[in-house]
Image (spheres, rainbow, N blue to C red):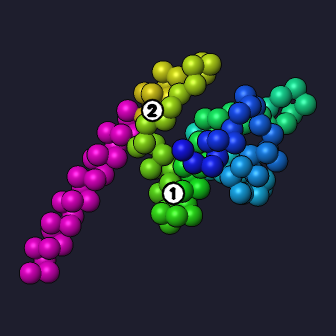
Amino acid sequence: MTNTDTEIKKLYYSISEVCKLTDLKSYVLRYWETEFRELKPPKNRAGNRTYRKKDIDTINKIKELLYNKKFTIEGARNQLAITPQISDSSDDDTTEKSKSTVTSTKEASVLLEVRDQLKSILDIINT
């Protein structure tokens, strides 16, 4: 269990609380919302973002991909599409998300197959 898991005890978190939990700046979180469709925290009546545990988990996954594994934003976006997401039962579009994940997984497997074939061709050329 990570340090973040032990700190998460509330149902909703403000952007400043999420910044402290993830060690990220608020402008980074707002930018990631524009780049990653998986990260769409709802807003309350005052217009403030309300992050849930699944949002924080998504943020941590994005942070891991971008900062530790050195993915580009496009690469991290593709990796998130491949990785099955834990869906929240309160989401109305759960089936739509699962359909897009299945499609993305198929596309990713096709791309991986093409990559392997291109590597084989390159090996033949280089020998």
Q: Is residue 119 magenta?
A: yes
Q: Along the polypeptide, which appears first: circle 1 or circle 2?
A: 1
Count residues near mark 2 (Cα–Cα under 10 Å), then give few for <14, some for 14-19, many for 20+: some
Please give the label number shown on residue 100.
2
Between 42 and 118, the one nearer to me in the picture: 42
Marks 1 and 2, how far apart at CA: 21 Å
Percent x, y of residue 102? 38, 32
Query: Quarter of the image holding residue 82?
Result: top left
SS at circle 1:
helix
Question: Decide: marks 1, 2 in contact (CB < 8 A)?
Answer: no
Q: Which kind of residue does numbered mark 2 sit on? A: Ser
Query: Quarter of the image holding residue 125?
Result: bottom left
Horizontal side of 53 relative to 112 (left or right) equals right
Predominant SS of the magenta segment: helix
Between 107 and 69, the one nearer to me in the picture: 69
Quick one: which residue is furthest to the right in this view? 46
Please give the label number shown on residue 21.
none
Percent x, y of residue 107? 34, 43
Q: Residue at x 10, y 73 (%)?
A: 124
Q: Residue at x 30, y 52 (%)?
A: 111
- Report the residue marked by disc 1: 65
Q: In the picture shown, does residue 102 fall above or below 1?
A: above
Between 105 and 1, the one nearer to me in the picture: 1
Q: Is residue 55 magenta?
A: no
SS at circle 2:
helix
Single out the mark in the foreground, 1 or 2.
Answer: 1
Magenta stretch in the rendered image? 102-127
Count residues near mark 1 (Cα–Cα under 10 Å), then give few for <14, some for 14-19, many for 20+: some
Percent x, y of residue 58? 58, 43
